[in-house]
């Protein structure tokens, strides 16, 4: 399975990159097998995510899923963001090869950890 144009766009032009100085929550997650790392900052106000930023190190799928997931949670209430699945992220980006689904798992883990 080749990467979709949408995934390649999120890899080449990642959104929401950076840090939030006064973040409500911060998470850093990694996959020891492949070495991918994602750090996520979230700002929550009145039960909604008002801002999210990330930094990631990894393959193109790791960067794209991190970018898309970060963009995806902005504006959602905390419980809705916690319920995002790896499948939702992968499908939104046009699918992931079987060997890359761990990238969307990384993004989901970061969201849940940052919103604890």
Image: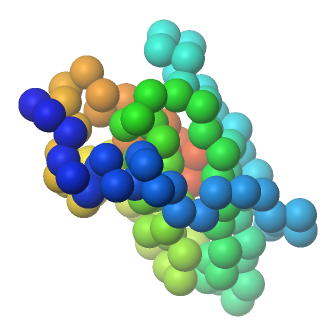
Q: Residue at x 80, y 64 (%)?
A: 20
Residue 18 visible in this rendered orientation of the protein: yes
Q: Residue at x 41, y 35 (%)?
A: 60
Residue 108 visible in this rendered orientation of the protein: no
**44 relative to 41, above or below:** below
**70 relative to 102, above or below:** below
Q: Residue at x 72, y 57 (%)?
A: 18
Q: Residue at x 48, y 42 (%)?
A: 63
The x and y percentages for residue 28 are 70, 38
Which quarter of the picture shows residue 69? Answer: bottom left
Residue extending farthest to the top is 33
| Image side of residue 30 versus residue 102, left or right | right
The x and y percentages for residue 9 are 34, 55
Residue extending farthest to the left is 1
- Give the camera-side residue of 14 and 83: 14
The x and y percentages for residue 3 are 20, 39
- Give the camera-side residue of 105 and 8: 8
């Amino acid at each position: 399975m080749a990467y979709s144009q949408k995934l390649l766009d999120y890899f080449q032009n990642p959104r929401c990159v950076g840090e939030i100085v006064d973040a409500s929550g911060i998470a850093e997650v990694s996959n020891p097998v492949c070495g991918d790392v994602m750090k996520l900052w979230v700002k929550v106000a009145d039960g909604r995510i008002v801002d999210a930023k990330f930094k990631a190190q990894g393959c193109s799928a790791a960067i794209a899923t991190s970018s898309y997931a970060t963009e995806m949670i902005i504006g959602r209430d905390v419980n809705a963001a916690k319920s995002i699945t790896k499948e939702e992220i992968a499908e939104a980006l046009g699918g992931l090869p079987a060997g890359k689904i761990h990238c969307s798992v990384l993004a989901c883990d970061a969201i849940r950890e940052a919103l604890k």
